[in-house]
Amino acid sequence: MNITYDVRFWEVRRNTSSKTPSYEARWKVGHKPKSKTFRTKALAESFLSTLREAARKGEGFDIATGLPVSMLQAEPSGPSFFEFAQSYLLRRWRTSAARTRETDAYALLTLLPALVADVPARPDLEDLRVALRAHALLPEDRRAKLTGDQEAALRWLEKASLPLSALGEAATLRLALDAISVTLAGKAAGANTVRRKRAILHHLLEQAVEHKAFTSNPLDEIKWTPPKAVTVIDPRTVVNPSQARDLLDAVPKVGRKRGARLKALFACIYYAALRPEEAADLREKNCTLPESGWGLIILERARPQGTKRWTDSGETHESRRLKHRADKETREIPIPPVLVAILREYIEAYGVAKDGRLFRTETGGSYSSSAYSYVWQAARKLALTPAQFSSSLAARPYDLRHAAVSLWLNAGVPAPEVAKRAGHSVDVLLRVYAKCIDGQQDHINGKINDALE
């Protein structure tokens, strides 16, 4: 190692030869000019500040690399961020639902192309994202064959990815937070999306702490205010019982057969507050349907829709445990006579699938969310006024569930019982439906008056 103490520094400047914005940190070691390019000016200035501090301390600089001795000794030897992100996804694969796998991967699709050094021959961004989505972020036995351009993009990322240790620096973490604040199309991301991606980054760094890459989670040190997310239900989406009945009566009028087969599914969402994926896996054995009076549904499983590459079965729908519940844990929901009658009529007309499922297509498959959403929008057009149709009133089938829970709360059903039937915790229930609980103030005030007297 050839050492010198003759070091000079210049200001950071914009790199005009690069297609994408980048900045050069410039300095001179002995008679040799040195430079290093960064994606942001802040990163370049942070690097130059480190060099200046080393020079002030009297450190020698290596003429060949231009770096102070302390930085040569501290060159990162751990995994790159790309390598650790791959292992993070694969470690979580077995215990994660398909939607969770997809959500994790899409957060990394945002982060991985952003946390890179300015290595020449940067590939087309879409080629890089396809290579990640269809190959690198999947288990080996699920990886698709890549084109030559996509393989080159992946090789570039392997070379350019920042070391995991770089995420211990505030400037790098702020670069990551900037990246998750925009969509893949480059527009401002929604508040819930940003919060979800930030949570994934935080969890990934928690895993890095477990692997001794950091002593504590570096993201906790960053003063950053996430965008405020809407966490309560908008009362304008909630239908009243009369509107719900009109909508359900309109569903069978849509199409030749599909609407008639779907009325009972929508009725389960409204009268029993089932999630659509819970209704999709409802089986005859789960239902107690007496000839008169109240019945009972005992939910055992849900059937969420996912993308084939992320599911265990390779199919779009697969049966899983209930949301927020342990495997084999059930949920009991008493159902009113009107829903009992609708389900009895449905079973008499259409029977059940070989596996006992109630709701399926004519060929025995599961309805896609786009299929039942199409029917729902057509029913809204038939049942609602033009002004209501163009509003957010019952805009999605899921809004029937919100209407059910709001109805129960406003009918005076105790919150713990509503939470038990809907599959929520009490605190989440009251927070989410806070704006939908109304009409009880006079009744509650009267109770307080009686108690005071």
Image: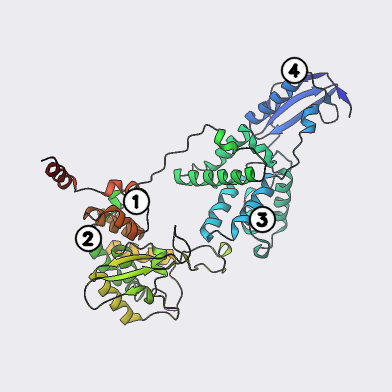
The residue lying toward the viewer, choosing from 369 and 230, is: 230
Kindly identify which residue carries mark 1.
426
Kindly identify which residue carries mark 3.
136
In the rendered structure, which disc, 4 or 1, sits on the residue that comes first in sequence? 4
Q: Say if 14 sits above or below 339 in the image.
A: above
Q: Secondary structure at mark 1?
A: helix
In the rendered structure, which disc, 4 or 2, sits on the residue that comes first in sequence? 4
Q: Position of residue 87 (x, y in %)?
A: 66, 53
- Determine if residue 163 is in view: yes
Q: Residue at x 57, y 37 (%)?
A: 219
Q: Say if 22 sits above or below 400 in the image.
A: above
In the image, 194: left or right of 241? right
Mark 1 residue crowding within 10 angstroms, few (<14) / some (14–19) / many (20+): some
Q: Amino acid at mark 4?
A: Arg
Mark 2 residue crowding within 10 angstroms, few (<14) / some (14–19) / many (20+): some
Q: Say if 94 sits above or below 436 in the image.
A: below
Kindly identify which residue carries mark 4.
56
- State which quarter of the image contains the C terminus: top left
Image marks 2 and 1: residues in contact by CB distance under 8 Å = no
Q: CA distance from mark 4 to mark 2?
A: 75 Å
Q: CA distance from mark 2 to mark 3?
A: 50 Å
Q: CA distance from mark 4 to mark 1?
A: 59 Å
Q: Secondary structure at mark 4?
A: helix
In the image, 239: left or right of 398? left
Q: Residue at x 66, y 45 (%)?
A: 211
Q: CA distance from mark 3 to mark 4?
A: 44 Å
In the rendered structure, which disc, 2 or 3, sits on the residue that comes first in sequence? 3
Task: Give the number of the mark in front: 1 or 3.
Answer: 1
Kindly identify which residue carries mark 2.
241
